[in-house]
Amino acid sequence: MPGPGAAHLAAQARAPHALDHLGRVVVPVALRRRLGWGPGTALMMRIDGARLIVERFRGLCVFCGSDDDDGGTLLGQTVCPACRAALRRTVTARGAAAPAHQ
C-alpha cells in the first residue's frame, strides 16, 4: 500500500465513500493523518452550495458565542476576530489612561 504521498492523498479524496445505514462515512486514514485528526477530534459541518464542508471544530467564541473561527485563541480560549478587535481597542484605550504596574 503506498504511503500518504500527494498522489495517494488525491486518490483517497476522489474515491467514492458510501454512507452506511446510519448516515456515517469513513474518512480514510491517509487523510486523517494528513489533517492530524485522531479519535475524539471534534468536527463541524456546513453546507456550501452543493458541497458538505467538514473541518476541525475549534470552539465557540467565549465572549459572543460565534463559531467564526480563524484559529484565534487567547489564554487557551477561542476568541472570534470581532471580539479580538474589540478587546484590542479596549486594552489600547485603557493602556493610555492606566498607570504603569510596578
Image: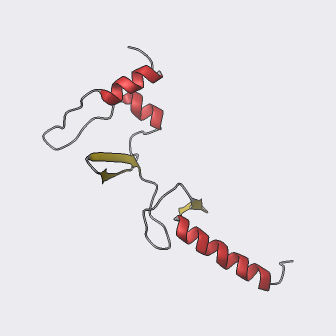
Image: 55 above or below 10 = below
Q: Position of residue 32 (x, y in %)?
A: 41, 34
Going 12% across and 40% down the picture, which residue do you hit? 21
77 vs 37, left or right, is right
Residue 4 at least partly seen: no
- The single residue placed furthest to the front in the displayed view is 49
2 vs 25, left or right, is right
Going 53% across and 54% down the picture, which residue do you hit? 71
- The single residue placed furthest to the top in the displayed view is 1
Q: Position of residue 38 (x, y in %)?
A: 42, 39
61 vs 96, left or right, is left
Going 41% across and 15% down the picture, which residue do you hit? 2
- For residue 30, which quarter of the picture? top left
Locate the N terminus by quadrant. Answer: top left
Image: 85 above or below 14 = below
Q: Position of residue 78 (x, y in %)?
A: 52, 62
91 vs 55, left or right, is right
Q: Position of residue 31 (x, y in %)?
A: 40, 32
In depth, the one of 75 and 97 nearer the eye is 97
Going 46% across and 37% down the picture, which residue do you hit? 35
Residue 19 at least partly seen: yes
In depth, the one of 49 and 90 nearer the eye is 49
Image: 24 above or below 5 = below
Colour scheme of the rendered structure: secondary structure
Locate the C terminus by quadrant. Answer: bottom right
